[in-house]
Image (cartoon, coloured by chain):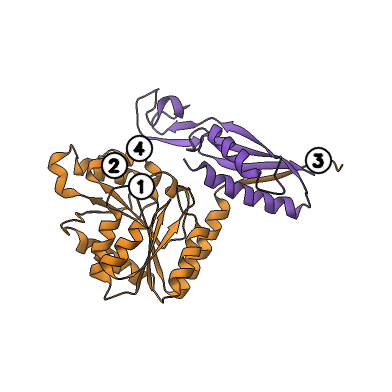
């Protein structure tokens, strides 16, 4: 039997994914495709928010949506039915997040239908998706009022990697001990560059502002 | 929180290194894991045992985890303190103006095989 060799590697577990993500981001830019990675807890209103904003933007861009979930295709069906844009469901096979490799596979399917604005609705989870760069042009997250204004303190990594934080369900603020100013302060402490937009996906409040943010970011990417 | 996902990443990375070095059997993989890396060592080991059985090169590979204790630094009184016991607040002066020096690492240190 051969002698045992010890090989030093000394690299981060996340390093190969980060490299893969940078490569994907560069390829998308070259093709003129903007990819938004949208993250949040389960039940914060990702699908409802997307529905509202897609209906505002679908005449301006060729939009495609990737819905990532552990199981089922309810979100992809909702998006397809209520917006009419191309929507595919990605199953993570039990995993709690998408990585750059899985995102690329989903995009390969979407790009066939000639899109210039792709949206990835990540698995509902405030921890794992933050660790894995998907290769998206921009990262956004939704924090909903019932979750509480202390979440930026509890899940610092998620808030520190997001370019945009949407605070959803502001219509129910009177019923929860939610302090909007404290919440903004907590977010900016983690991430001074974050844009914060309070919205209500159900009534449409703030969705115009969200749509304008997207228009601006998409034009910067061109 | 995402132990299974990272196990797959580790297997891919070390398989590549094993092949480059003409190994036919990897006996052990050593990781360095910070105590505030959001990865639970016991779960990681469970996922590892399940996932390596499906591979060729790593079938019998043992996972060795070297912990790295988390230490934070206070920018006001310039002392270092135990992050796990104290969180973000400096136990010496009570300031919240602190940052993590080490403890969120998640590194593949080395592999051994033949």
Mark in the foreground, 2 or 3:
3
Q: Residue tagged by mark 2?
A: A186
Sequence order check, earlier mark of 1 and 4: 4
Same subunit, labels 3 and 1: the answer reads yes
Same subunit, labels 2 and 3: the answer reads yes
Q: Are marks 2 and 1 in contact (CB under 8 Å)?
A: yes
Mark 3 falls within which chain? A
Left or right for A36, reference A53: right
Secondary element type, mark 4: helix
User: How far across and how far down the image is residue A26, in percent?
Assistant: 49, 67
Same subunit, labels 2 and 4: the answer reads yes
Q: Label 4 to label 3, Cα distance in Å?
A: 44 Å
Q: Residue tagged by mark 3?
A: A4
Mark 2 falls within which chain? A
Chain B shade in the render: purple
Secondary element type, mark 2: helix
Tell which of A95 and B71 is nearer to you.
A95
Q: Which mark is residue A159?
A: 1
Q: Label 2 to label 1, Cα distance in Å?
A: 9 Å
Chain A shade in the render: orange
Q: Residue at x 51, y 61 (%)?
A: A22
The residue furthest right is A1
Secondary element type, mark 3: loop
Q: Residue tagged by mark 4?
A: A154
Residue B19 sits above or below residue B90 on the image: below
Q: Label 3 to label 1, Cα distance in Å?
A: 45 Å
């Amino acid at each position: 039997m051969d002698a045992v060799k010890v090989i030093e590697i000394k690299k981060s577990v996340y390093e190969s994914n980060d490299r893969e993500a940078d490569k994907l981001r560069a390829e998308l830019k070259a093709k003129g495709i903007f990819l938004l990675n949208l993250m949040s807890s389960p039940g914060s209103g990702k699908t409802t928010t997307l529905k509202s904003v897609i209906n505002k933007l679908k005449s301006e861009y060729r939009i495609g949506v990737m819905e990532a979930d552990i199981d089922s295709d309810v979100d992809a069906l909702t998006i397809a039915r209520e917006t009419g844009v191309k929507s595919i469901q990605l199953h993570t096979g039990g995993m709690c997040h998408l990585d750059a490799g899985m995102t690329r596979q989903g995009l390969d399917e979407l790009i066939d239908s000639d899109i210039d604005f792709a949206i990835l609705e990540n698995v509902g989870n405030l921890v794992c998706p933050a660790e894995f760069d998907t290769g998206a042009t921009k990262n956004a997250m939704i924090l909903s009022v019932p979750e509480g204004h202390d979440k930026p303190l509890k899940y610092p990594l998620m808030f520190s990697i997001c370019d945009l934080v949407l605070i959803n369900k502001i219509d129910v603020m009177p019923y929860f001990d939610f302090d909007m100013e404290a919440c903004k302060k907590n977010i900016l402490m983690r991430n001074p560059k974050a844009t914060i937009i309070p919205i209500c996906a159900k009534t449409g409040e703030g969705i115009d502002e969200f749509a304008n943010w997207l228009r601006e970011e998409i034009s910067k990417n061109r | 929180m995402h132990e299974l996902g990272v196990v797959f990443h580790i297997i891919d990375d070390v398989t590549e290194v094993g092949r480059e070095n003409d190994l036919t059997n990897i006996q052990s993989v050593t990781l360095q894991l910070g105590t505030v890396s959001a990865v639970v060592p016991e779960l990681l080991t469970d996922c590892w045992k399940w996932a390596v059985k499906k591979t060729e090169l790593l079938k019998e590979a043992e996972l060795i985890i070297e912990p790295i204790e988390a230490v934070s630094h206070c920018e006001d009184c310039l002392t270092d303190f135990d992050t796990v016991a104290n969180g973000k607040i400096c136990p010496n002066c009570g300031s919240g103006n602190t940052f993590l020096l080490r403890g969120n690492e998640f590194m593949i240190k080395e592999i051994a095989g033949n």
